Image (cartoon, rainbow, N blue to C red):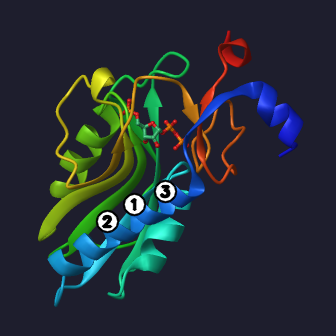
Amino acid sequence: MDSRRMGRDLDKVLLSAEQIDQRLGEMAAAIDADYAGRELLLVGVLKGAVMVMADLSRKLSLDARMDWMAVSSYGSGTKSSGVVRIIKDLDTDLTGRHVLIVEDIVDSGLTLSWLVANLRSRGPASVEIAALLRKPSEAKVHVDVRYCGFDIPGEFVVGYGLDYDERYRSLPFVGTLAPHVYA
Ligand code: PRP
């Protein structure tokens, strides 16, 4: 992305690429320890989780399987409603598997709350969540995030998989979007 345009569109860098990389390393070490001797299935939620999945999975020592889901939340604009539709389902039968959902962000918690219940109904051995970001101030339902990267303020953030209108996903850091972009 053009750095001058980025400078105008972003208010600040909230989390640098180095901070993200270090925190993902810590999360991977915890996951390695917790799942030692067990077969792990990472479930990435498209599209925002692509960067987290790519970097977190490569920091794991254990050889995790990987699968993907795409879901759509009916809602107005940028807010999710909790009514979720599956756009792309898993290819994997979850029966007896240890599942770790990989997400970029837990905002209201409605998407993940629905997803956890949905995956738990498929007979897995366990279902846990790893999310890079969480906005405690925006939570509408409690979601138990076993591996959380950072708690952040309720600002509009983009980058590292997170978009605004499908832009900024490829930024290597997480930044705060300037209000004039979405005003
Ligand atoms: C984001 C994020 C979560 C969800 C979190 O996805 O990846 O899935 O919103 O919001 P919630 O906690 O309020 O439910 P989004 O719907 O923006 O789709 P994307 O991953 O394709 O960008």
Q: What's the residue type where badge 1 is placed? A: Arg
Q: Is residue 76 above or below residue 24?
A: above
Q: Quadrant of the C terminus?
A: top right
Mark drawn on residue 20:
3
Q: What's the residue type where badge 3 is placed? A: Ile
Label 1 Cα crowd, 10 Å radius (few <14 / some 14-19 / many 20+): some
Would you identify the image quadrant in which residue 177 lies? top right
Could you tell me residue 44's position as x and y percent?
43, 60
Asked if labels 1 and 3 touch by Cβ distance under 8 angstroms, the answer is yes
Q: Residue at x 23, y 85 (%)?
A: 39
Q: Which one is in front, 97 or 61? A: 61
* Residue 90 seen from this side: no
Q: What's the residue type where badge 2 is placed? A: Met
Label 2 Cα crowd, 10 Å radius (few <14 / some 14-19 / many 20+): many
What residue would you read off at disc 2? 27
Q: Which one is in front, 34 or 15? A: 15
Q: Residue at x 72, y 12 (%)?
A: 180
Label 3 to label 2, Cα distance in Å? 10 Å
What residue would you read off at disc 1? 23
* Label 2 secondary element: helix
